[in-house]
Amino acid sequence: MRTIDLATWPRRQHFAHYHSMTYPHFSLCANIDIQTWYQAIKARQMRLSTSLTFVFARAANEQVAFRWRIRGDSVVEHDRVDPSPTVLLDNDLFSFCVIPYHSNYAEFAPLAEAKVAAVKANPTISDEPGQDNLLYMTSIPWVSFTGIMHPVHLNPIDSVPRISWGKHTLEGQRRLMPLAVQVHHSLMDGLHVGRFYERVQAILDNPDEFLG
């Protein structure tokens, strides 16, 4: 992790502009095509939810803006950010779960399964105080939604990206699934989120490269 020098940061004016706003978050929601990935996952008898968590975490870690976080009047850049998905429990509630990120799916998947099993046994909705090297994630597989808004802290500032996905449906040769991204505008713009979507789709279209 490093602290960004705001005096020389090319984004300093945009940061200051949005940093002063009462509600500086924005969100996008668009369909992605998971058909190629879905078929590969089913053929390998892997868990779709685990694999999608990996895809979104990998795409985010490759985009530096998704690793920036606001701390007071400063900005830090993490070397790595870990996915923190919600995990559905048997009583219709959920638990938070933090999974250490690995760029290799063979390493990520068993660790993710172990972490999910652990929080199901001992649920929690608490994060480590001050921990912001996370990517909040949630799946809503019952709804093919077209938009979503997440609660955030405004004081102290919460700049952790929120990534959500919904019900997928087969339409012709495509299996479409809504993917929503909510971020802090001080740290990124539509361009950066657009690049995230492009990278997600590129990974989904090439499962052999990323699943092994």
Image (cartoon, grey):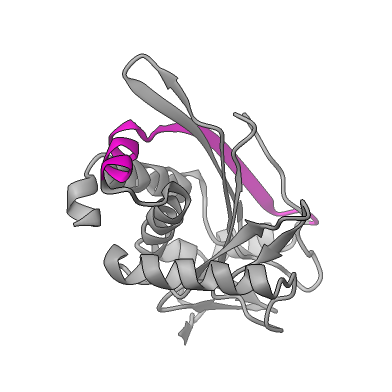
Residue 21 sits inside the magenta stretch? no
Q: Residue at x 56, y 33 (%)?
A: 167
The answer to whether residue 56 is above or below residue 73 is: above
Front in this rendered view, residue 182 or 44 = 44
- Taking depth in this image into account, of 46 and 126 the one nearest to the observer is 46
Point out residue 160 in the picture as x, y percentages from the top left corner: 61, 65
In the picture, the quarter occupied by the N terminus is bottom left
Q: In front here: 193 or 91?
A: 91
Which one is in front, 207 or 2? 207
- Identify the residue at horizontal 18%, vertical 49% (top origin): 208
Give the x, y percent position of residue 177: 48, 32
Residue 204 in the image, given as x and y percentages of width and height: 31, 43
**Side (left or right) of 10 relative to 142:** left
Q: Which residues are magenta?
A: 22-43
Q: Position of residue 132 (x, y in %)?
A: 60, 75
Which part of the image, by quadrant, shows the C terminus? bottom left
Q: Quadrant of residue 146?
A: top right
Residue lying at the far top in this picture: please name it. 172
Residue 173 shows in the view = yes
Residue 22's image quarter? bottom right
- Residue 31: in magenta span: yes
Q: Residue at x 32, y 48 (%)?
A: 45
- In the image, taking residue 183 as reference, residue 211 lies left or right, namely left
Residue 98 visible in rendering: no
Q: In the rendered view, does 42 fall on the left or right side of 209?
A: right
> Residue placed at 62% from the left, 44% from the top?
27
Q: How many labels were placed on the picture?
A: 0
Above or below, 157 relative to 178: below
